[in-house]
Amino acid sequence: MLLHYPPAFERDMGCSEAQWLQWLPGAVGACELRLGQGRAEVVLPEGVLHLAWRPAEPRVVGLVRLPRLLVSFRFQGADAPMRLRFMRYFDLYMQRGGG
């Protein structure tokens, strides 16, 4: 988990689009989620988070193929503390496999 989240960044997520869509509603907590094709808007208490994603070539490790999704995060009207609060919950929810 980071201590600072810039207004815009990209991530390489280790999941399929189907998994992402299954997890996303829980990851945004009580915030309103507006889904579209390859995109979503999350209405925050202060501002909006625009998400856009596209599948990428799977990561191959030996005989294992891991799905990948390239996700763009763009906050609009959300200050640094709001971004941090939202992303801490989002990251914790999306974490898989323990740590």
Image (tube, rainbow, N blue to C red):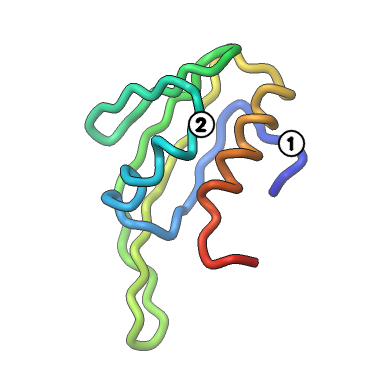
Residue on which disc 2 sits: 29
Residue 7 placement: quadrant: top right
Q: 67 left or right of 5?
A: left
Residue on which disc 1 sits: 4
Q: 73 left or right of 91?
A: left
Residue 47 placement: quadrant: top right
Q: Residue lying farthest bottom?
A: 62
Q: Residue type at mark 2? A: Gly
Question: For the residue labelled by badge 1, is the local secondary structure a helix, a strand or a loop?
Answer: loop
How many labels were placed on the picture? 2
| Quadrant where the image shows the C terminus | bottom right
Work out whether 18 lies above or below 50: below
Q: Quote the CA–CA distance across marks 2 and 1.
A: 20 Å
Q: Write the residue at 53% across / 67% down.
A: 97
Q: Write the residue at 42% across / 31% down.
A: 51
Q: 1 left or right of 56?
A: right
Q: Residue type at mark 1? A: His
Mark 2 vs mark 1: which is more N-terminal? 1
Q: Residue lying farthest left?
A: 37
Pointer 1: residues within 10 angstroms few (<14), some, or many (20+)? few
Pointer 2: residues within 10 angstroms few (<14), some, or many (20+)? some
- The location of residue 73, given as percent across then percent down, is 49, 33
- The location of residue 27, given as percent across then percent down, is 48, 39
Q: Nearer the viewer, residue 64 or 90?
A: 90
- The location of residue 65, given as percent across then percent down, is 33, 75
Question: For the residue labelled by badge 2, is the local secondary structure a helix, a strand or a loop?
Answer: loop
Work out whether 53 lies above or below 39: below
- The location of residue 81, given as percent across then percent down, is 74, 24
